């Protein structure tokens, strides 16, 4: 196995004290290796990336379950207990994530134990076969849970995201076909550590893994879809609490618009200084958890929204309050100090992710370079745009940054008070208990 | 075990890099106790006030300790900052204590001490706001319940174990409509006495400055009688083995909540036992985890918790969802068998050493996060014991005797009162 090395350049942002250096080594046997140095917490990380196109949520869950079973069930030489203890005493974390285009496995540990962590992971991946009981367990663990059942905003955001991203209908691969899809040499390995020599890390990770052309790699990449507009109401007369959500899948015209939108959503609902907290919780005493949603789910793509769980008797009134918060933000009636605080909160979030979350940087990188690294400089323009954005002028742009509320989807889960005629103007679908959210999403999409 | 033991010697050498020494302040004034923990490598100071009363101390109505926490924190803000901060409360209520944390730069120490001192003053807020804060507490309790249905089942198991809905058990959701302002003010009057509170000042501050600031802001407090922990006398029926079956749509999967209680013959010195308890619980947790989850396939999910009270009473709780094909009764039988097998299982010195190493690794991880080490400082403090720093704890773990570890494991495995809730998941109708 041979590598050629070239320096690609710098991903940087003026305010970051530590530049994020990127270095790439391309393997002529098709595993591309990219090195970042953004982690500043004394840890090192490696993200193994397999190009696998999951058209459905079920396929995505199955891929993650298989990989999870593989790395959690031990080997003939290492018991599961030994593996767990090894990870505990060496502070080793494994993280699995799937997107419609990639399956990712990140190993992270303190630099002093990273080489042992990599050797441990390499041994787990290279072991033959898979434990059937662990496969059953992880299949259950990675199943999708309906947001209409547990009624948390996090589950709702996840279900709406899946609906937007996983739009195909290819049958899920049988377990027997899953093994060669995953347990082959990864298409990319993304390393990340500051002042650390990775040495032969990538060789260790790939030892025992062979290059195989994956079947799912040749499946089409599902086209994403927008969320419908209108209102969904799950009727539950026995509920005392109602989850109120208004949001959308937001495709941005530019990274600057993305940073502006992120800042405005932080202003509206991120933390105790936000409008949602100040008005919905402190003034109206209506919710413990009012919040905004801004989660990047692709290149210049995010799910955005506002949500709160409120007394069922009050949901129409509080929905109106939340709508007013959004309309005021869009109208540029935003406190300047609050915008600056929100901009700082956005930057702190980005810096925190860069410094501590290798999985975050890997995802941002793969959104830009899903197949292989670029020939030139790796540039995450989002970082520069985030730092360059001027909160002092944001009120001027708020109306163009935030779309009208008519473009949003309202989801009301619980309670018996029917949505007003106004909320039904752009479409309405009523769900009964036990029915999946997708039923209404599809009905509203079809008009 | 070659794979693991090869790493042990290196781990023992890598204790937390920053030594954190807990220094008792010589003059705590009216407070139960006062400590300073200088940490010079961070430009911040944290002041934690630990009121030594929590949900276990509620007389009749659940959530009163929690509601009092809200009122005291908001009132403290109002008194010092003139208006409530637009922030979530940096306070929480546990079984045995209520902890308030105020953090800032070293130059803000006066304001941090003022905010801390004001917690002990009778809450003074606009009547409408005080009343409506009950709604926020309701929403918070329901929010936590929604995010973790296991809380409800565990509560039922503890109610059956102790035969009570107050003290060591509670009825948090059912009691939401019984919360009153007067009950909270009564709780404050009874429990928010200086002599029922401990202060821990940590961060970039010297012992001399900490003492001076304590005198400046708490010098007017006087010692009073401590509030007794009446719930410590609250024990299950000696031969209890309660098994209750329910059907519910509130859980996604069939589930078991299990609780077990052990009382030593004589009250124990928990301060001397604490490191041994951490090692012992790691060992029995590992054995049960192996038997039911990692290497056996009884459980789809399996979580365990152990709590040791200040007199040495041991409370062990389990939440288990059975693996596919395993019934609730089979899973409970496997759990009880696994506990019973600990009576005869040989615990090797190597196993104890491994548990020590895991606790040292855990301790080391705490040193990197202010949130983590602040929690650690007040963990033992919540029982009225001197707080422990990660550095000191690592040394205590190293010094804990094998015999004491084995004694606690034997106590855990002994035949003692237990209660189980077997919940069959049903569809939502």
Image: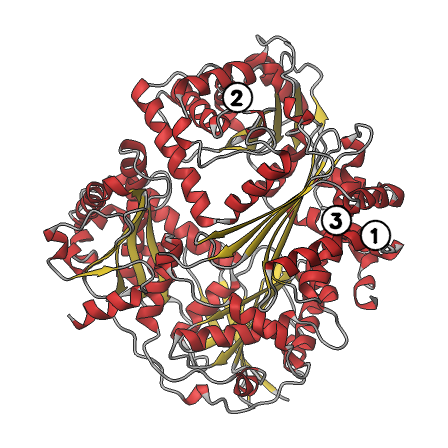
- From the top left corner, tell me how far across and down residue B121 is, in percent: 48, 14
Q: Residues within 10 Å of mark 2 (few under 14, many from 20)?
A: many
Determine whether label 3 and label 2 are within 8 Å by CB: no
Q: Which residue is mark 1?
A: B352
- From the top left corner, tell me how far across and down residue B231 is, in percent: 64, 26
Nearest the viewer among A19 and B287 is B287
Nearest the viewer among B268 and A303 is B268
- From the top left corner, tell me how far across and down residue A384 is, in percent: 36, 60
Labels 1 and 2 within one chain: yes
Among the two numbered marks 3 and 2 on one chain, the one whose residue lies closer to the N terminus: 2
- Label 3 – label 2 distance at C-alpha: 33 Å
Q: Which of the image's four quarters has the N terminus of chain B?
A: bottom right
Write down the chain letter for disc 3: B
Between marks 1 and 2 in the image, the one whose residue lies nearer the viewer: 1
Visible in this render: residue A18?
Answer: no
Give above or below for B207 relative to A175. Answer: above
Among the two numbered marks 1 and 2 on one chain, the one whose residue lies closer to the N terminus: 2
Residue B397 placement, left or right of B335: right
Residue appearing at x 35%, y 22% in the figure? B130
Q: Which residue is mark 3?
A: B360
Q: Residues within 10 Å of mark 1 (few under 14, many from 20)?
A: many
Q: Residues within 10 Å of mark 3 (few under 14, many from 20)?
A: many
Residue appearing at x 40%, y 70% in the figure? A379
């Amino acid at each position: 196995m041979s590598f050629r090395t070239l320096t690609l350049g710098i991903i940087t942002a003026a305010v970051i004290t530590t530049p994020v250096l990127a270095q790439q080594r391309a393997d002529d046997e098709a595993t591309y290796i990219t090195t970042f140095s953004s982690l500043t917490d004394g840890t090192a990380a490696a993200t193994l990336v397999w190009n696998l196109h999951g058209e459905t949520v079920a396929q995505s869950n199955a891929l993650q379950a298989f990989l999870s079973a593989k790395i959690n069930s031990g080997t003939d030489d290492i018991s599961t207990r030994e593996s767990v203890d090894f990870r505990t005493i060496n502070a080793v974390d494994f993280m699995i994530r799937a997107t419609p285009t990639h399956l990712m496995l990140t190993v992270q540990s303190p630099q002093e134990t990273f080489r042992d962590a990599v050797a441990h992971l390499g041994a787990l991946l290279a072991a033959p076969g898979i434990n059937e009981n662990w496969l059953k367990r992880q299949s259950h663990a990675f199943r999708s849970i309906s947001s209409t059942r547990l009624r948390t905003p996090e589950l709702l955001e996840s279900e709406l995201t899946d609906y937007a991203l996983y739009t195909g209908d290819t049958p899920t691969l049988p377990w027997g076909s899953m093994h060669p899809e995953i347990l082959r040499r990864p298409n990319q390995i993304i390393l990340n550590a500051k002042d650390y020599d990775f040495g032969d890390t990538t060789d260790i990770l790939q030892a025992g893994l062979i290059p195989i052309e994956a079947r799912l790699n040749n499946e089409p990449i599902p086209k994403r879809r927008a969320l419908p507009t209108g209102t969904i109401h799950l009727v539950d007369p026995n509920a005392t609490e109602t989850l109120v959500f208004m949001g959308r899948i937001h495709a941005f015209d530019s990274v600057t618009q993305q940073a502006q939108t992120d800042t405005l959503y932080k202003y509206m609902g991120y933390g105790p200084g936000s409008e949602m907290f100040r008005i919905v919780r402190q003034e109206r005493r209506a919710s413990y958890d009012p919040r905004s949603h801004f989660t990047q789910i692709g290149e210049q793509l995010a799910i955005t929204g506002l949500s709160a769980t409120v007394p069922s008797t009050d949901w129409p009134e509080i929905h109106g309050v939340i709508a007013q918060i959004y309309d005021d933000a869009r109208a540029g009636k935003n406190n300047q100090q609050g915008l600056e605080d929100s901009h700082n909160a956005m930057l702190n979030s980005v810096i925190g992710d860069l410094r501590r979350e290798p999985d975050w940087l890997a995802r941002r990188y793969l959104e830009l370079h899903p197949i292989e690294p670029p020939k030139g400089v790796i540039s995450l323009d989002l970082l520069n745009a985030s730092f360059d954005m001027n909160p002092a002028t944001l009120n001027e742009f708020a109306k163009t940054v935030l779309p009208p509320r008519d473009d949003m989807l309202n989801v009301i889960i619980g309670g018996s008070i029917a949505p007003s005629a106004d909320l039904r103007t752009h479409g309405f679908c009523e769900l009964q208990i036990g029915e999946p959210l997708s039923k209404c999403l599809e009905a509203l999409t079809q008009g | 075990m070659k794979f693991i033991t090869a790493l042990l010697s290196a781990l023992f050498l890598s204790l937390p890099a920053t030594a954190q020494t807990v220094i008792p302040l010589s003059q705590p004034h009216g407070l139960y106790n006062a400590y300073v923990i200088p940490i010079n490598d961070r430009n911040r100071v944290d002041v934690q006030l630990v009121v030594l009363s929590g949900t276990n101390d509620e007389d009749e109505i659940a959530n009163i300790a929690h509601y009092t926490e809200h009122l005291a924190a908001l009132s403290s803000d109002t008194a010092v900052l003139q208006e409530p901060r637009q922030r979530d409360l940096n306070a929480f209520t546990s079984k045995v204590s209520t902890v308030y944390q105020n953090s800032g730069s070293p130059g803000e120490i006066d304001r941090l001490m003022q905010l801390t001192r004001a917690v002990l003053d009778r809450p003074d807020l606009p009547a409408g706001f005080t009343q409506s804060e009950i709604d926020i507490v309701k929403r918070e309790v329901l929010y936590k319940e929604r995010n973790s249905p296991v809380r409800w089942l565990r509560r039922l198991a503890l109610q059956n174990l102790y035969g009570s809905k107050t003290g060591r058990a509670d009825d948090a959701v059912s009691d939401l409509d019984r919360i009153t302002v007067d009950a909270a003010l009564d709780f404050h009057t009874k429990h928010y006495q200086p002599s029922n509170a401990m202060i821990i000042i940590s961060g970039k501050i010297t012992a001399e400055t900490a003492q001076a600031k304590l005198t400046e802001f708490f010098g007017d407090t006087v010692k009073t009688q401590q509030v007794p922990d009446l719930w410590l006398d609250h024990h299950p029926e000696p031969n209890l083995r309660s098994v209750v079956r329910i059907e519910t749509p509130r859980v996604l999967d069939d589930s078991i909540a299990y609780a077990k209680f052990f009382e030593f013959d004589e009250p124990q010195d928990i301060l001397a036992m604490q490191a041994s308890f951490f090692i012992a619980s790691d060992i029995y947790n590992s054995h049960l985890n192996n038997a039911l989850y990692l290497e056996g396939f009884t459980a789809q999910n399996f979580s365990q918790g152990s709590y040791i009270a200040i007199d040495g009473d041991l409370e062990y709780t389990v939440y288990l969802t059975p693996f596919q094909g395993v019934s609730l009764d089979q899973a409970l039988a496997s759990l009880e068998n696994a506990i019973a097998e600990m009576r005869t299982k040989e615990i090797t010195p190597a196993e104890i050493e491994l548990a020590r190493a895991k606790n040292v690794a855990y301790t080391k991880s705490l040193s990197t996060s202010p949130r983590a080490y602040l929690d650690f400082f007040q963990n033992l403090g919540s029982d009225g014991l001197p707080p422990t720093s990660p550095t000191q704890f690592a040394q205590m773990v190293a010094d804990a005797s094998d015999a004491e570890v084995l004694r606690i494991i034997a106590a855990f495995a002994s035949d003692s009162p237990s209660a189980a809730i077997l919940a069959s998941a049903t569809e939502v109708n």
